Amino acid sequence: MKKETIRSLPKIELHCHLDGSIQIGTLEKLAKKAGIPLNSLTKAIAPKKCHHLKEYLESFDCILPLLQSEENLTLAAYDLIEQAAEETIRYIEIRFAPLLHQEQGLSIEQVLRAVCRGIQHAQKQFDVQANLLISALRHHSNAANQQLIDTVTQLNSETIVGFDFAGDEQAISNEKIKPAADYASASGLKLTLHSGECGCAQNVVEAIRLGAVRIGHGVAIKSDTAIMDYCAKKGTLLELCPTSNIQTNAIKEWADYPLRKFLTHNVKCCINTDNRTVSQTTLTEEYLLLATHCQLSYLEMKRLNLNAIEGAFASQQLKDQLVQQINSGYADVIPSSEA
């Protein structure tokens, strides 16, 4: 597989965090405008190999202070879609945690509207369809997260299509977030959960039982055949983020990356960046790495993108359009005998 070919092929991304994916150049502009020294951004890029997830998450400490105004949030969303357009991503679901953007007094509604504006402005400029996933944080109270859900549903934005839970899954179990997860589902929001990133395969099972139809990461199930079979039977989609998974030690090294095992066990997967800037990656780079380390083919790349469309929290009409784009886009790189 060739990098330029991968870049030019239509792609789908479902797991991309807004705050971790703003270009360094844009962050520098925001820092300069705020009078913040540019050297404060040195930690925005995480080490290539962190000791643990917590070290990886420390990168956000210097980014979040720059995302406390409506103007900056709108710019951030625009910036991310511009990046997606540059590598032929046709549909992206952007996730972010509104409760982390209230340090300067913004209401949840102001935060949500600001990001939605950025998405809407960008879609007028670039050939990228985008929707928004709202992330709750495990360490916040169920009451705070339920209030967040209320604001989301009252806003009734067509751009907001799903709900996510992120945070320390080892310290705060899926059982503890059950009231808020149930509340999100009852409010009509489709659910994806970060689970199985920190070594516990059972967390993935619990997340599915909570109503999650997609799992953020989920790589911990690689050593449990029964749970892989359970995910395959349920049709649960794993949102894999290879570079991030290795960076945080969810997977120790490329030789252990479980994509090939998941494909063999018919576990549905899709490929994502997680945090473009923090991990210094692109979706093109993720596929190139999988080609190098997991012998990924163009036919398998097509299947992974079709999996993403099937699991996307988009309208059926949009999904049908995206399927056509994928089928057409890959026709020249996949022999007719394989297709």
Image (cartoon, rainbow, N blue to C red):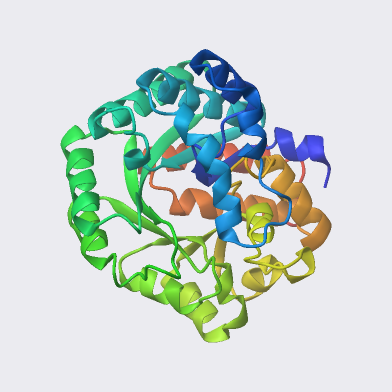
Q: Quadrant of residue 116?
A: top left
Residue 182: x and y in percent read 22, 62
Q: Is residue 39 above or below residue 210?
A: above
Res 95 seen here: yes
**Rendered residue at 30%/73% (across/down):** 175
Residue 21: x and y in percent read 57, 36
- Residue sitting farthest toward the bottom: 226
**Rendered residue at 45%/54% (across/down):** 311
Q: Quadrant of residue 241?
A: bottom right
Res 240 seen here: no
In this rendered view, identify the residue nearer to me: 2 or 251: 251
Looking at the rendered structure, the number of numbered marks drawn on it comes to 0
Q: Quadrant of the C terminus?
A: bottom right
Residue 62: x and y in percent read 54, 36
In this rendered view, identify the residue nearer to me: 10 or 207: 207
- Image position of 139 (left or right of 6): left
In this rendered view, identify the residue nearer to me: 219 or 130: 219
Q: Is residue 317 above or below residue 125?
A: below
Residue 248: x and y in percent read 63, 59
Q: Quadrant of residue 228?
A: bottom right
In this rendered view, identify the residue nearer to me: 165 or 93: 165
**Rendered residue at 52%/34% (across/down):** 63
- Image position of 256 (left or right of 314): right
- Image position of 159 (left or right of 305): left
**Rendered residue at 65%/50% (across/down):** 302
